[in-house]
Amino acid sequence: MRDEERRDGDPSDLELVQAGRDGDESALGLLVRRHHAAAFRVAVSLVKEDDVAQDVVQDAFMKAFRALDGFRGDAAFRTWLLTITANEARGALRRRGRRKESALDDAIEVQSGDPSPATAAIQSVEAERARRKLEELPDKQRMSVSLRIEEGLSFKEIGEIIGSSEGAARVNYFHGIRRLRELME
Amino acid sequence: MNETMCGTIRELIPDVVGGRISETDLGAVEGHVVECSECAAELRLAGTLFASRPVPPPGLLERLLDSVRTSAPAVRTRAQPSRVWWSVAAAAVAAFALGIGISSDPGLELPVEVPGYAYEVEEGDIWVSDDGLLAGAPLFDDLSDDALLQLLEELSVASAGGSA
């Protein structure tokens, strides 16, 4: 399940937030549809387990919705939600006190335009290897790479989520992608 | 290969794989990676990562939407008065109604009909009967918490005084 893209004429996130503040349940539902997949990726990147990540995402959305009055719109709703999700994930990790290997086999979905079975198999193996190597990066490098490539966030937004400056987020991204290339060679 | 050019292209690579790039910039990237194996390798890696993004398990979306439906009242802080104050208002009205009924003739054992709105209030139901208008619910709509507290105190005094 992917995040639903916003189409022309659809309400903006900020408009949905305002409607949600006034008790419009469908507006909150639309925000969930738009951002749940990104929130899940952030959560699973940190907690490594699908079921824990799902709990984290649910808690993050509920926390965000209860705090809608405090959302001033300085940042994008998506960035705000992902920051809450990352904090919830870190909290879950602290509570658990340990980490486990990621259930990547269940989480990976290769998107490619109907390749041949042989090509698909190679791509799948390559993708799984890339994701396993990605897991080897330090947290901030891994998050910076994921958020930049998978979510298309700016370095400023990434910095807000990982708790660093825009410049540090940029450095983490480029160090991370270079290290990942070295690991893949 | 020009280091500055490589730096510019690598800034753009995430936007290329995510389809968030202008035709002009896309042309520049495509032209560059033909000649630069380093940037071409980085583009392939980014493409692989983007294509293998983890996806939420089936059922997560429905679970989240369900939790929105069940938790939405908690979000509507500005749309509705809190359940606590509705309960206080209902209790105050019930006490007032009963107080009048008892104090009008305290010496007689009159059958007291408990109005519908004084029955147990179920979760999610503020008024279980249709006589909310008689119970005065609309009158409380615009009262502040302080005004409701004052009203409750007045009703308590009136009720105590009337039955003494």
Image (cartoon, coloured by chain):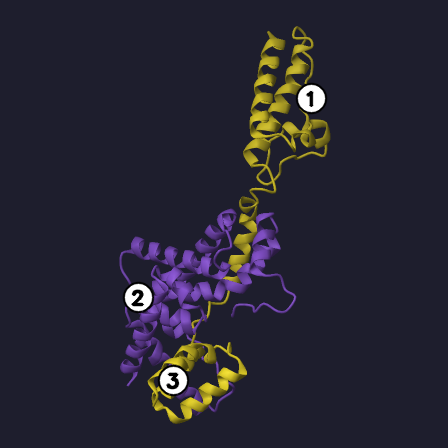
Chain colours: A purple, B yellow
Q: Are marks 1 and 2 in contact (CB under 8 Å)?
A: no
Tell me which amino acid carries mark 3: Met
Give the chain letter at badge 2.
A
B135 w.r.t. B124: above or below: above
B36 w.r.t. A104: above or below: below
Give the chain letter at badge 1.
B
Q: Nearer the viewer, residue B139 or A156?
A: A156
Q: Label 3 belongs to which residue?
A: B5
Q: What's the CA distance linking mark 1 and mark 2?
A: 67 Å
What is the number of the mark on residue A180? none
Q: Label 2 belongs to which residue?
A: A139
* Secondary element at tag 2: helix
Give the chain letter at badge 3.
B
Q: 10 Å neighbourhood of mark 2: few (<14), some, or many (≥20)? A: some
Number of marks in picture = 3
Residue A60 seen in this snapshot: yes
